[in-house]
Image: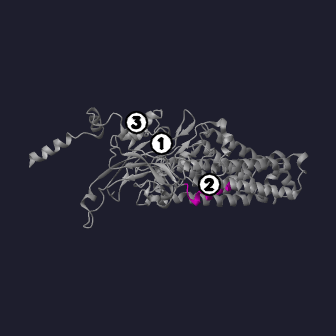
Amino acid sequence: MAMELIDAYLEEQRGLTAVEKFALQHDQRKIPQDVPIYQDLIPKTTPGPGQQYAFAVDLDRCTGCKACVAACHSENGLDEDESWRSVGLLQGGSNIPATSSRNVDDQQPVIQHVTASCHHCLEPGCLTGCPVNAYEKDPATGIVKHLEDQCIGCQYCTLTCPYDVPQYNKKRGIVHKCDMCISRLQAHEAPACVRACPNGAIQITLVEAASVRENPAEYVNVPEAPDSRHTLPTTRYLTRKRFPQDMTSLDFYAVKPQHSHWPLIVMLVLTQLSVGAFWVTGFLQHSLSPSLREALVPYQVLVSLGIGILALGVSIFHLGRPRYALRAVIGLRRSWLSREIVAFGVFSFLVTVMAFSEGMEPFRNFLAQPFKDLLGLSTALIGALGVFSSFMVYKVTRRPFWDHPWTLIKFLLTSGILGISTILFSTIFLLHLQSLEATAEIMKEFGEGFCWALMGLTGLKLILETAIFLHLGDGKSSSFKKTALLMTRVFQSVTLNRFLLGISGGVLGPLFLLTFREGMSYPVVCGVSSAVFLLTLGGEFLERYLFFRAVVPLKMSGG
């Protein structure tokens, strides 16, 4: 019995890997030299009406050798750190309790390699999100192609694709991705990954678009894959095995920080500050005495305008090809990023008109007051549309931490908090340049109300931000729990400083102004109000930093 067991182990050790078997068959000329086997892995006909090309993967044949990855890399001349195809690993089975109603095999540990590339979706997230129309879905083949000469390197498609397919090339300043080796298919040859697989695990098939729409769950149907209803992918994964219920990716419990995107952080915070400052200025315009209104409103409009222009200028630094930034409005029909850019562009233009009509003597009486009121209302609404567009830019990525109504509420609260702190500080500073005695009048006329509003908005926002920590007690490692873990472990100091700045600037500072408002000298009032502005601004920058760094992205199964 012992000898039989030893013989069995020795025989198993003598087994060849998939690559070795393929090489042996090739050397023994068991594979024809004209290689017709590859032609069996692509359709014999081109797609007909309602059809498109798609990948089909036989998981039972995939051994994780990564020959497909190497072939794709070589065929497309990718850089060393680039890859358009990946091979992930799923594992499970060991934690399933044995029951009399289940097969014994289900309790055994299971591993499964998953090769993946672009799924050439019917409704590609990369295509709908791109602000410059740098993607197109070929009407004849259904292949989603990236137009490199059109790309400006905004990297938004890397956020909107739930499968992490588009890859940003920092050297070239553009994104690119798999095109299913369309030039090979047009020559009736198999794509590089198909040809390279020694087991024939990957092939090209024809799928019916109607079938994909009717049965989206049958496509990219592997454990932990993003919901196929998001973009309607067309890749089918075939297997004769039944995966255990606890099948997870190799990095399921890992928590990984994401890119900070500092230009986007600055742009988001400053655009919301600009809109908030304009909203607060509009409130002052209808509540101040005529003398104070004439002294303050023109300057406050200029403050809003200057910050808005600064925000749009900083956003250009996020682009890989900033000289083509003006292309970003091309995708207005379908991209929320284009809509965000247009909304804030129009907002800045209207604020400029307001600045001329309120502050420049030759233009002050050019518009009648009803038209000025209508212009102010329109500008405020366009600013609100810009903030809403910013929310939608991140909502459509489907990342749970972003795809939540609280994101919109937090964006609006940022506008209110920074708008109040900015106008309070700039008002006191500007009035001091004109009249020292006006400081007390300002605090009495609207400063108290601003302090109460600032404390209320800051308190509400901080409460909303702490809600994420409730997920630390989740039994399952959800995306919200991973975000909370990142904030309390990897970014513990950032999180702590964010709340310290928020409380100091948005609660304690205004409370100090309210408590000691009687008899405070100008230097004290100016010093405290400037501290309130700087602390709240710093707190919002840190909040937005965590917004990008602690988010958990969607990705293809396997890790």
Residue under label 3, please give it. Answer: 70
Q: Which of 436 and 167 is in front in this view?
A: 167
Q: Residue furthest bottom?
A: 101
Residue under label 2, please give it. Answer: 391
Residue 218 location (% of width, % of height)? 43, 58
Left or right side of 435 for 87: left
Q: Which of 338 and 406 is in front in this view?
A: 338
Q: Is disc 1 surrounded by few (<14), some (14 to 19) or many (20+) residues within 10 Å? A: many
Residue 513 is tagged as none
Where is 133 relative to 405, above or below? above
Label 1 element class: loop
Give the CA distance from mark 2 to mark 1. 33 Å
Left or right side of 465 for 432: right
Which SS type dominates the magenta stretch? helix
Give the CA distance from mark 3 to mark 2. 39 Å
Mark 2 in CB contact with mark 1 (< 8 angstroms): no
Q: Is disc 2 surrounded by few (<14), some (14 to 19) or many (20+) residues within 10 Å? A: many
Q: Between label 2 and label 1, give the one nearer the viewer.
A: 1
Given the image, on which type of amino acid does mark 3 rest?
Ala
Given the image, on which type of amino acid does mark 2 rest?
Phe
Residue 180 is tagged as 1
Q: Nearer the viewer, residue 310 or 44?
A: 44
Left or right side of 546 for 336: right
- Provide the residue span drawn in magenta: 402-417
Question: Which residue sits at x=47%, y=41%?
Answer: 185
Label 3 element class: helix
Residue 386: in magenta span: no
| Residue 529 visible, this angle | no
